[in-house]
Each structure stands twice: as structure tokens, then as C-alpha cells.
Image (cartoon, rainbow, N blue to C red):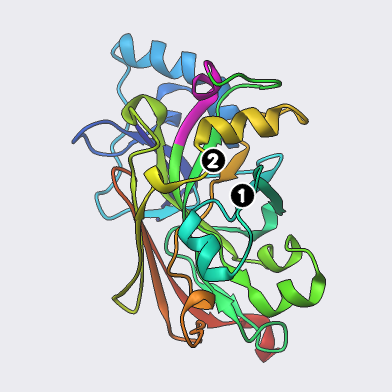
Amino acid sequence: MKVGRIAGADSGEFVARMRDDEPWSRISALGVDAPTTAALIERLPEIGAALRSGTAAGDVAADAELRCPIVEPSKILAIGLNYIDHVRETGATPPKQPVVFAKFPTSLSGPTDPIWLDPSLTEQLDYESELAVVVGRKARRLSRDNALDYVFGYAVANDVSARDAQKRDGQISRSKSFDTFCPIGPWITTADEIADPQSIGVRAFVNGEPRQDSSTTQMIFSVSDILVYLSASMTLLPGDVILTGTPPGVGMGRKPPVFLGVGDVVRCELDKLGRIENRVVADPLLSL
């Protein structure tokens, strides 16, 4: 099943589901209110019961606009240096354990939303196509045997980065958390549709030019490894998001480096999960 958040022409944003080749249908038509991702996950049994009972769900227009499928996560965690070829292109030392940082929830944006650029804050805007994991159950001290049972679903993410700010700060959470720096979408694909998260192709394009082309088979730490590591020290909650690292081909790794500018369009796509496409624009508050 795919779960998305859709902008209605006259009804604001609402949650919808799609299975196989069926049209999108409103979850609210099943009598279920899910204002956040955590609430949606909590009410999945009610959604399933309503569908089994034959309750009709209102169809959504085929050209409906998809918005960010993640709403109010308690945390967004990300893993750095998780593909060995990306480690090499950055000149870093291969990590012995996952490199963890936070992206703040205010950085979230949707699958077609613009990425804001303020040259006074960064002149080294970069992209990172990644597999995003959405936690489905409260989790603490998971094991490799049960870790994937706690995944609600997967999505495409772009871990947008301000490389110069990253260097100046000496840590990376702020430079990864500017507003609009975490586009996710186009929907959440539930875990039952992804037999193996370690066999997904990961690609990125800038203005149509291929920049990244790899697979989650190349991850140093698997999704299970990451969940076990994180849950050993913190409680993961339903709706939390984990970005699992990016393969080689980022702008910083090119020789010479090539960063994003106003007008550039970044497309990130993952096998089985869809694609997101975001244009870089000047921060709208610069004109005020």
C-alpha cells in the first residue's frame, strides 16, 4: 500500500491510500482521522477493518498534488558516510559504527516543493539521494532478528546540505536542517511491499544529468544495523524518520566540486518507491 498526503482543491490537505493500480482514496472517507503520521500508524487497524467491511472510500482526482507524507515526527535522524564509495569521494575514514546526526522537523518539505537558497548562508548547496525509513512501532533495544518488524514503510528523500556551513560549524545538524532541506515523498510505501530494503536502486539527476547511480546493497550499515544501533540508546517512536545515507556522486565529491544554484532541478528516485523532483529557488524572504 502507498500512503500519501494530498492537497485538495477546496478541502486542504488530507491522507489518502492507494493499492496496486487502484486510484487514490481518502482515508477520512473510512471514518478515520489521521492528522499526523503517528496517528495514521496508530489507526491502521481501523483502516483495515473498514476496508474489509466494504466501506467505500472517496476517490481522489488522478492529477491531485502530492505533499510531504510525513507530518510531525518526533525526530528525523540521518546516517552519514554509509556507502564506501561516498566515504572515498569525501576523503573520510570508513566509520566503525553509524555516523548519526539530526535533521530538524522544520526542514521537511514535499516531493515537488522548492529548495530555498540564500547565498549569504551557503554557496555550497548539495544534494544526497537517500532511502528514508519510517518507524512503525515504539522501539527500544531492537535485535537484528526483529528490527525490520518495526518499520512502517519507506520513501525517497533528499538530504540537502550546506557544505560550507557544515565546515564552519564543526558539526552538521544545522547545515542539514535549513528550511526545505529535507524533501520526502512522493508517498510512503508500506514495508509489506518491500521484501528487502537492501536491494533498492538509488539515483539522482541534476537538470536531467545523472549524478548518482548505486544501490542499497552498497550500504556499510544495513537498515537493520541502523535500527539496532539507534534503538540501543534512544526510543524510536511511530512516525520517526531515518535517512540511511547517500551513495557517491554528490556535488562536493566531483572534481572540481559542482554545487546547486537557483534554477537547478534535482530529481531523486529509488526503485519501487518513486521519485521526487525539487527546483532550487531564491529564499522568498530575501525579497522582503
Q: Given contact means CB atoms under 8 Å apart, are the residues at marks 2 and 1 in contact?
A: yes
Q: Quadrant of the N terminus?
A: top left
Distance of mark 2 from mark 1, alpha carbons?
9 Å
Q: Which residues are magenta?
A: 145-153
- The residue at which mark 2 appears reads as 221
Q: Considering the numbered disc 2 on the image, is that residue within a helix, a strand or a loop?
A: loop
Q: Residue furthest left?
A: 21
Task: Locate residue 76, reporting x and y percent.
Answer: 66, 46
Residue 149 highlighted magenta (yes or no):
yes
Q: Secondary structure at mark 1?
A: strand
> In this view of the protein, can residue 238 be seen by the observer?
no
25 vs 144, left or right, is left
Q: In the depicted view, which residue is nearer to us: 165 or 257?
A: 257
Q: What amino acid does circle 2 point to?
A: Phe
x then y, percent, for residue 137:
60, 22
Label count reads: 2
Q: Residues within 10 Å of mark 1 (few under 14, many from 20)?
A: some
Left or right? Give the position of 55 relative to 159: left
* Residue on which the image places disc 1: 79
Specify the farthest residue to the right: 169
Residue 69 badge: none
Q: Residue at x 42, y 82 (%)?
A: 264
Q: In the figure, residue 211 lies in which quadrant?
A: bottom left
Q: Decide whether residue 41 is among the magenta residues.
A: no
Tell me what residue is drawn at x 67 percent, y 49 percent.
99
Above or below, comparing residue 70 to residue 145 in the picture: below
79, 183: nearer the viewer: 79
Residue 284 visible in the shown view: yes
Residue type at mark 1: give it: Ile
The x and y percentages for residue 286 are 68, 87
